[in-house]
Amino acid sequence: MAKTYKIAVIPGDGTGPEVIREGRKVLSALAEKYEFKVDFIEYDLGGERYLKTGETLPDSVLEELKTVDAIYLGAIGHPDVKPGILEQGILLKLRFSLDQYINLRPVKLYPGVWTPLKDKGPDDIDFVVVRENTEGLYCGSGGFLKKGTRDEVAVQESINTRKGVERCIRYAFEFTRKRNKKNTLTLCGKTNVLTYAFDLWERTFHEVGEEYPEIKREYAHVDATCMWMVKNPEWFDVIVTDNMFGDIITDLGAIIQGGMGIAAGGNINPDEGGVSMFEPIGGSAPKYTGKNVINPLAAICAAGMMLEYLGEKEAAESLERSVMRVTAEKLKSLSAGKMGYSTTEVGDLVVKFLE
């Protein structure tokens, strides 16, 4: 009997529904080819709902999302909603409530894709960033003193627990072992300045690392990591880091792999019964909404990450091979309106090459 996966779909704002439409098209084709079923359940979370009702993520919807196999997200962000409301009310609430404590970001250059790095190709740009996703500066701990006066003080605290740091680092070691490429895990931090937080990170990194003698351990300050990602991206295999630094270096990673049009990510709860969320990392791109010109490959690649997470490895590999053919043989560019194909046509090409 074919296995059925219950997938919550949050198309979101702007061009989110357009790219999710193409991802669903590819998922449906793969489900038919590899004999599994996908039950899509759509939720209208995002800017339009907030503007109409004042709701971001109702508790009743959150409880429903705790019962699905995975969440497929398009984009969150609306030009008529003040920045921070949707991000905190939906994205961060999902990550924290579902304990999605790993943000997983492959940085991989596909054939035919332009990179701003001179003399670098697909063999040079192929690494993964494991970012702690529920602690650090993103906890929202802190506050104001004498707000609005000349004596105003603003404090934002980075919260790092042994539990949170260790489970992230352990996941990174397990991922490096499973990836089985260079078997090298690099801790990205700032031990010379952030002497408390990254003392905890560094000690935990080496203590846990003793259990993985086959994995080489390296350390790099975050500023050096940024330089080497540009100068020598081939040095990296897997990078593990905290929430803030991970947010920064993964955007740099997106650019060196060709841009937001190809960059996908996962917010992972690896624990048994956990619910994870997969998304293109680009924003809602409202200026392109409804024009059928946005690049859907990041959303399609996010669907591939979701398939691998669900255990459909063969289908995930088929999807990636198809995307690589599309980038190598068809697209003129990854930029919206410059691909040489519409959003719909790119989705059709991925489906075609699956066959």
Image (spheres, rainbow, N blue to C red):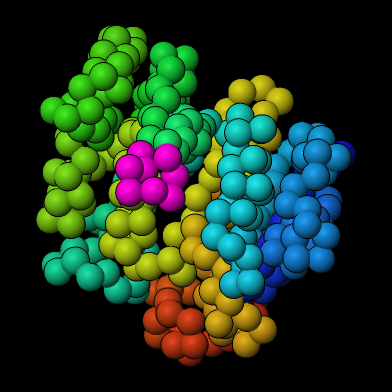
Name above or below for residue 315 compared with residue 28.
above
Query: Which residue lies at the image location 73% right of the left edge and 52% below the top edge?
Result: 56
Q: Position of residue 270 (x, y in %)?
A: 58, 28
Q: Quadrant of residue 171?
A: top left
Q: In the picture, which quadrant includes the C terminus?
A: bottom right
Magenta residues, as a range? 146-153
Query: Which residue lies at the image location 39% right of the left edge and 30% below the top edge?
Result: 157
Name above or below for residue 273 compared with residue 54.
above
Residue 44 visible in this rendered orientation of the protein: no
**Viewer-proximal residue among 329 and 21:** 21
Name above or below for residue 267 compared with residue 73.
above
Q: Position of residue 330 (x, y in %)?
A: 45, 82
Q: Position of residue 170 (x, y in %)?
A: 41, 20
As for residue 126 lying within the magenta part, the answer is no
Horizontal side of residue 241 vs 289, given as left or right: left
Query: Which residue lies at the image location 77% right of the left edge and 34% below the top edge?
Result: 66
